[in-house]
Amino acid sequence: MHGSSRQGSSRPVQGSSRPAAKGGPSPAAGSAEAQHLTGLLEPVVSARGMDLETVRITAVGRRRLLRVVVDADGGVSLDDITLISRVLSDELDANGAMGEAPYTLEVTRPAWTAR
């Protein structure tokens, strides 16, 4: 791994995400890195029958937090979150997309689809 630590979320992140506008995911406004990551991750998420809702990168001390919100028709189960978290982590590491700096990957689902 490229300095990453996997952290799949078993809980939705309350109040931190809104539905994406029609037509695709909404990366954090003004973030070229988030837009690049959206382009990289969207096909991976879509291939597993899910929709990439948001990609957000924030600084947390010396680390970065990459928060990815996924959804699907009928909702996303915790097993789905676990699987897609592993797949996305592998994709990020294989492409060196997050560079050498340490980061935490958090994959979650919108609160309104929790089941």
Image (cartoon, rainbow, N blue to C red):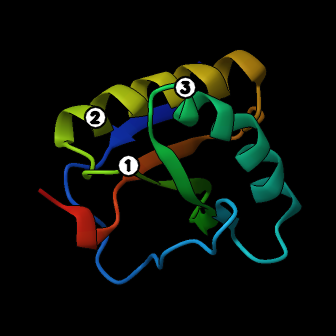
What element does badge 1 sit on? loop
x 36%, y 41%: residue? 7
Q: Which mark is residue 72?
A: 1
The tag earlier along the polypeptide, 2 or 1, is 1
Label tally: 3
x 46%, y 34%: residue? 5
Quadrant in which the C terminus is drawn: bottom left
* Residue at image mark 2: 80
Residue 25: quarter of image: bottom right
Q: Which mark is residue 13?
A: none
Q: Residues within 10 Å of mark 2 (few under 14, many from 20)?
A: some
x and y percentages locating residue 36 in the rendered image = 83, 47
For the question of whether residue 76 can be seen, the reply is: yes
Q: Is residue 66 left or right of residue 105?
A: right
What element does badge 2 sit on? helix
Q: Nearer the viewer, mark 2 or mark 3?
A: 3
Check the image and report above or below for 32 versus 49. Answer: below
* Residue at image mark 3: 47
x 78%, y 34%: residue? 99
